[in-house]
Image (cartoon, rainbow, N blue to C red):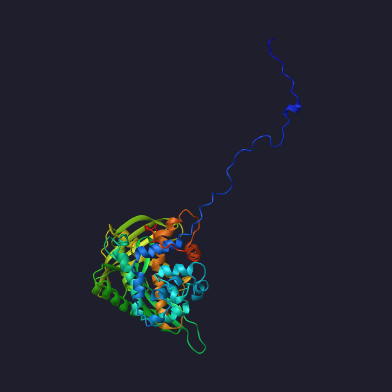
Amino acid sequence: MGKRAQKAQAVDPQDLATESGAYRTPWRRPAGRKPGPAPECQTFGEYLKAVVAHCFPELIDWLDALPDPRRQDMCVYTGAHLWFEILLTFLLRGGSRNAFDVDRNSGAMPGNMLQLCGQAWDEARLGPRQTVTCSGNATHHAGRVPVADVAQIPLKMVRRLLQMRLLDSARLLDSWWLIAVDGTLQERGRKRKGKAAHYRYVLTASLIGPEGLTLPLLTEFVEVRGSDYDKEDCELNAFVRLAARLQRHFPRLPLCLLADGLYPVQRVFDLCQEYGWKFIFTLREGRQRLAYDEAVQTMLMNPQNLSIGRRQGEDGSVDQTLRWTDHIPFGAHRLQVLFSGEVSPAQATLWVWVTNLHLDASRVYAIANHGGRLRQWIETLFNVEKNGGFGLEHTFCVNETASQNYHLIMQAAAIVWQLLAKGLLHRLTRLCRKVTDIKLVALLHASLLFVPLPRLPSPRIQLRFLPAPG
């Protein structure tokens, strides 16, 4: 070391001592993810009023115009009030009449109900307390009104949406409106001692709209008594009646029917040819065995009829292989058959359809994915109505006329709910996590029960539908 190097100084051990808390704790991100915003339900009732006013401004007049055999000078409630009570019973998804009755006169519900149904409360005659009619009164009234008149309500609602051009984007190849036809059990009656169980079966034609909208259009009731019945005969006979009504109401509308494997039969093909309809029906191997086998053989002999693509499914990307063949004999008709083989991360699936649409490489993807596959949406609607609180298959009343009218108003409530939820509420609560439709219904119920609707005109809204899964 150099002569000028400084010697190391001795350090006092006490100088190195530290005290707890003498230094700032280092910053760290809190564990877990940041909670999402909570849905604000205060305005849900106002949104319901706005959607009804925007899409169906004449709904109250339609309900008031239904036949009303009551003495009007002795009535407390208007006809629209009685029908709106049934509509709200389904819209709030209690699953039964009692579920709506239990708090119908609580909180702000009576005042909100009067606003929704357009009834002015006459305090001089009825007293200061506003009330909502009970389900027994509404059911008695529904049993006295012809079913054919009530059936016009869902029909008028869908006509109004068509006139608004709200559903134009759902047309197949920009030309044909898709009508899904399927049957389901409407009511599973209670089995009485010494008598067979009473079943009520129903056939529904629903208009397929954009992004998962399935709008019930026409309903044909089929009553089946006893547990042993032939579903095929009942449903096909009902389809003949339903098709005649559909042609009468929409004689010039270009329609394309979607249906399951029950319908590829001569009788249905003849009706579609007579009315000028297109169709895409599911083809089952056991239903039309000879036609199915010939379609497979001719498909193998035409390797040029091939289209390979990919679509987005619920479980991820789906590899899709489309193959088709032409002029397959189905009795007196020569039709096309389309095969769709799909491989997804979850499973492999084969779809087969018979159609009278022209098939080529530029059209098969749209016909398969924006046509044939959309038939499952009517099954989804039935599932929601059965298990989502609407009460399909529930015995709401013994009277047959009232039961059928209840079912028709259920379809009207399904239309209103889809427009409200898919066109507005899903978009407004998109950032909120895990907000299901059942939760949205509960929030709507709470809004109508505790938040009075403003007397001002409904605010302007914009319906925009989020993409449907799959």
The number of discs equals 0
78 above or below 36? below
**Relative depth, front residue between 43 and 348:** 43
Query: Which residue sits furthest top?
Result: 3
Q: Position of residue 460 (x, y in %)?
A: 37, 58
Q: Position of residue 410 (x, y in %)?
A: 41, 72
Q: Is residue 468 visible?
A: no
Query: Which residue sits furthest bottom?
Result: 194
- The residue sitting at 48% across, 61% down in the picture is 436
Where, quadrant-wise, is the N terminus in this rendering? top right
**Relative depth, front residue between 355 and 165:** 165
Q: Position of residue 434 (x, y in %)?
A: 50, 58
Query: Which residue sits furthest front?
Result: 124
**Relative depth, front residue between 112 and 348:** 112
Q: Is residue 79 visible?
A: yes
- In the picture, measured across the screen, residue 337 lies left or right of residue 420, that is left
271 above or below 310? below
Q: Position of residue 78 (x, y in %)?
A: 40, 76
- Quarter-of-image position of residue 4: top right
- In the picture, measured across the screen, residue 16 lies left or right of residue 104, that is right
Where, quadrant-wise, is the C terminus in this rendering? bottom left
